[in-house]
Image (cartoon, helix red, strand yellow):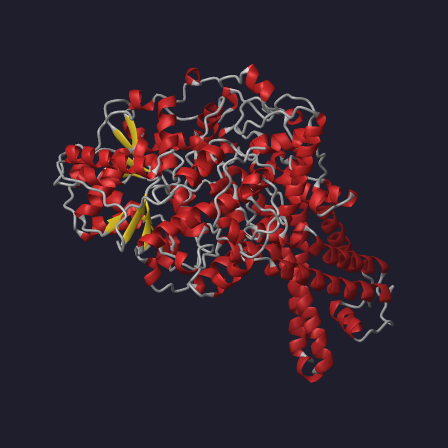
Amino acid sequence: MKDGDAPHPGSLARPDREPLIRLRAGDLMPIQEPLDDPARERPFTALSDQAKSRYECILDDTCAVSVPRPATREDEDALVRAFLSGLDKLFTRENNWTFLQPLLLSMEHCARCQTCASSCHIFEASGRNELYRPTFRSDVMRRLYFKCVRRGGMLSAWRHGDIEVNWPLVARLIELAYRCNLCRRCAQTCPIGVDNGLIAHELRKVFSQEMGIAPREIHENGSMLQLKVGSSTGMTAAVVRDNIQFVDDDTSDRTGVPVETPWDVEGADVLLIHNAGEILAWPESVGAFALILNAAGISWTMSSELAGYDSINYGLWYDDAQFARVAVKHAEAARRLKVGRIVLGECGHAHKALSVVADRLLAGDLNIPRESAMTLLRDIVMSGRLTLDPARNDFPVTLHDPCNMVRLMGVVEPQREIVRALCPKFREMTPHGVDNYCCGGGSGFAIMSGHNFADWRFQVAGRKKIDQVLGAFADGLGPATPKYLCAPCSNCKGQFRDMLAYYGLWEQNALLYGGLAELIVNAMTNVRPGYIQWEWH
Amino acid sequence: MTIIVYASLCLSMALFAAATLVRAVRYARAPLHLRWEIYPVPHEPADRAAHGGSYFEQSAWWTKPAPANHWGTAKAFAVEALCLHALRAFNRPLWWRSYPFHAGLYLLAATVVLVFAAALGTITAPSLVAGAPAAVVRQCYRATGLAGLLLALLGATGLLHRRLTDPDLRSSTVPGDLFNLAAFISALVTLGAGWALAPAGTPGPGAIALGLLQWDVSLRIPGLLASGLILSAALAAYIPFTHMSHFVGKYFTYHAVRWDDAVARRGGSIEKAMAEYLTYRPTWDAPHVTADGSRTWADIAASQPPDKTTR
């Protein structure tokens, strides 16, 4: 891209209805073998004329939020006023005590050194497209802050940069807030501690909490549905119990070990909360947990309280009110059952939401200890309570680090202790641990596929990760050797499922993904061999 | 001219201190936020900090002691502040320019402290600082002053050059950024030239500091040197009003955000602070929030959103 063509913060206010950039396959970051063949690059599916006419798809080649086009100029003006009102509220104690201090710090101290740029997988994967530079969105926000919140004049504009405020700017900014995975790798590298991920998060809050605008997948079909019926999957308590019964039966058949999930056991030590998506999409993970916990003699239960059987908390990504409501529901479920602790299943954002971010919200008897399934599984594996044979896992394995669990919560080693003990052909990705790259599905993207957003999700957001995965298995690519990508997080698994299929990596390279619990059961000597089934699902 | 120099220096120091304090207090008084840490967190025990682990790696972590590794925190912050570790690790080309700049500023700050400490000593305990000790201090601040000035000038020039030539930086540069660096270069060049070209008999830094403390207006400061001092004073007063005050912000971003993993305990101070915040009455306008100005955050968190929330 030539300098003159590159978007700059002021471009967002451009009044025409054309996207600011076009992504071309040749501009994107090269990926290694076998995806290094330019002929294999898939062009972006074009947005339909209907999408372009009905929604504000004027940022880039895709559309994540689908904001309806305002019918009149008055409607546009009203939306701009709402945005500015929300922006003001974002910097008040009463409305945003939750993140006011870190937000102010990030607004007022960026030195524009661009150290964060090379840490951002989206910016890198896009071929360093200016629009996806981690500071691009932040610079827009910073200009708005100094102009509209601090009421800065000409001197302020000269010092911080000016910006025109109109509906195209707001519409593009809504979309731009959803071009960041909130992985916060950029914040980790910032010499000053400025957090571009937080800025994207706070922008999303303005749009949701003030304007009622958020992607349907994470609001209406996500947190709203969870609060209404108990799960974003739509499963009520009765349905989830039925499904778990089916999982138990299936797991018993497959393993030869009778499995029964305990429900609503008052006084149990552990309340296990899965991401309910696992029950529908990856029942083998849910079954593996039940088998392991029973075999290890853990006193545990699942809950059929509203939201007590679904650990997701999508509010984490876009809305403090929704976030708080769901966190309280999770804690209430544990309080009613008088359990000793909540253990979060293989779901990264649920880990961070309930263990870290909600920690200060849950007071009194709602403050029930929360623990990662990684530590519980590690303790079980290392305790010798299960008889395990690593030879059953004699295939190449690599481990994905879910950002929310690892970089943002510090649970790094327990899962590694397990795979090191049980998988003789384990190999790390580069980089890994707290320096990992996001799978590209973070912050809700894994469940967002409207219009052609999936193309962007796989070709841009997930590009760096798929490159890393291929690198980890570079010694055995091709269909002959089955390979296992262990991703102990539902959203990451969703992203990998879709991305491996998109690139044909299962069919041509026998690259399968799955969770951690399955690897443990696969190594248990008292279950029938072959718990991991080498077939696409 | 001497009075203007003295007044500039006094005003600058007062403004710098007051504005820095106001900024720090503003951040310190902001409400305690929800946890938002990033790992590694250096106050974890060394074995966990090495791989970026947290206390969450222990089962039943809430029953285990949480020893704070103060040495780890001090070391990490010192390395970051003194060596610009993150910049060195993640942006080496810029570090080569930024490090001399910052090291130069640290040395200049040390010079100011030494000069005024020596002047104060001369006034309050002349017998103690006379003779050899005074000569040693004088040599010290001459060395730090000269090195600081050269390093800061070199760094500022390098940073300006990079900002003008590196496409990555140019795209995010605003006029204010160029002005800031140009202001540093102008002040440092003028100050350096003022000392280098000063005629014989010109009072040295110690004499000027002593003159300021004793308000001795008989001191004769040459015009170029006076200009350098006034420009430097203006620059120092300007810094706390800009993003260059990140020496304040950085303390909070590291200690109060990135490394703040303090757990809320039942009946503890965090719970008490949260109890107050939960009584705040937000006014967010989206229907699903149900914040009509009368309901508190606690009410909202404990309530269901209405079924119909579409506008």
Looking at this view, name the residue that lies furthest to the bottom: B127
- B179, above or below B199, in the image: above
In this rendered view, identify the residue nearer to me: B140 or B281. Answer: B281
Name which quarter of the figure residue A341 lies in: bottom left
Write the residue at 53% across / 57% down. Answer: B256
Residue A536 % position (x, y)? 28, 25
Residue A357, can we see it?
A: yes
- B268, above or below A231, in the image: below
The number of callouts visible is: 0
Residue A335 % position (x, y)? 35, 54
Name which quarter of the figure residue B197 lies in: bottom right
Write the residue at 72% across / 58% down. Answer: B236
In this rendered view, identify the residue nearer to me: A135 or A3. Answer: A135
Image-based side of B191 in relation to B293, left or right: right
The quarter of the image holding the C terminus of chain A is top left
Image-based side of A99 in relation to B125, left or right: left
